[in-house]
């Protein structure tokens, strides 16, 4: 694929894109975090797809890659908008849980549980979430007998 000039990620029109628009079952077979890291190293901050592998989606949320689930018809409409104008603006609003392509008249809601939404809005990872409870952890540790492991 690296030498294939027709491979979409080698297309110069899309250099600098930060949103990957993909097909269904994205991430199937990718049970390690390395798949998410590779996508991020490719410059992507989010992936829009009709569905994701559960393990891959979980790895996305733990590593800061926004997984956006929308209907296949919405993905196809976004693809058509990109084909018509490769500079078309796509906006993912994690606060409102919407994806928008204003030039194509596309607005679609996407699901995200409140904890995951909070992680993205606050820029938190597992360590950051743990550290946000440092006071409670310190209080608990101070109340435990020192001889306990």
Image (spheres, rainbow, N blue to C red):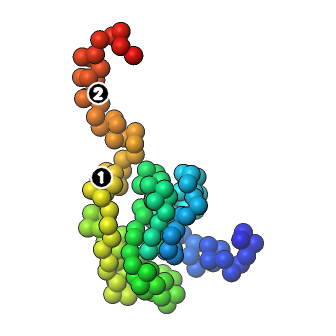
> From the viewer's perspective, is residue 32 above or below residue 43?
above
Query: Is residue 49 toward the left or the right of residue 105 in the image?
Result: right
Q: Name the residue at 54% across, 64% down.
A: 27
Whether residue 88 is visible here, answered yes or no, is: no
Crowd tier of the residue under label 2, counting other residues whose Cα lies within 10 Å: few below 14, some 14–19, many 20 or above: few
The quadrant of the picture occupied by the C terminus is top left
Q: Quadrant of residue 101?
A: bottom left
Q: How many numbered tags mark residues here?
A: 2
Query: Is residue 56 toward the left or the right of residue 74 in the image?
Result: right
Percent coordinates x, y for residue 92 in the rendering:
36, 69
Helix, strand or loop for disc 1 = helix
Q: Quadrant of residue 78?
A: bottom left
> From the viewer's perspective, is residue 111 above or below residue 102?
above
Q: Name the residue at 72% across, 69% down.
A: 2
Structural distance between the alpha carbons of marks 1 and 2: 20 Å
* Outermost residue, right side: 3
Q: Nearer the viewer, residue 10 or 147?
A: 147
Helix, strand or loop for disc 2 = helix
Which residue position holds label 2? 137
Q: Name the residue at 33% across, 70% down.
A: 110
The quadrant of the picture occupied by the N terminus is bottom right
Label ID, residue 115 = 1
């Amino acid at each position: 694929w690296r030498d294939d000039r027709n491979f979409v990620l080698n297309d110069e029109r899309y250099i600098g894109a930060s949103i990957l628009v993909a097909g269904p079952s994205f991430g199937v077979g990718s049970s390690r975090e390395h798949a998410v890291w590779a996508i991020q190293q490719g410059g992507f901050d989010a992936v829009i797809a009709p569905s994701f592998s559960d393990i891959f989606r979980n790895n996305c949320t733990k590593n800061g890659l926004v997984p956006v689930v929308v209907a296949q018809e919405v993905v196809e409409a976004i693809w058509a908008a990109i084909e018509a104008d490769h500079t078309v603006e796509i906006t993912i609003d994690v606060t409102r849980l919407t994806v928008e392509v204003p030039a194509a008249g596309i607005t679609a809601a996407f699901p995200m549980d409140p904890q995951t939404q909070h992680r993205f809005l606050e820029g938190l990872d597992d360590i950051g979430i743990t550290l946000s409870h440092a006071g409670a952890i310190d209080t608990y540790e101070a109340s435990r007998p020192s001889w306990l492991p």
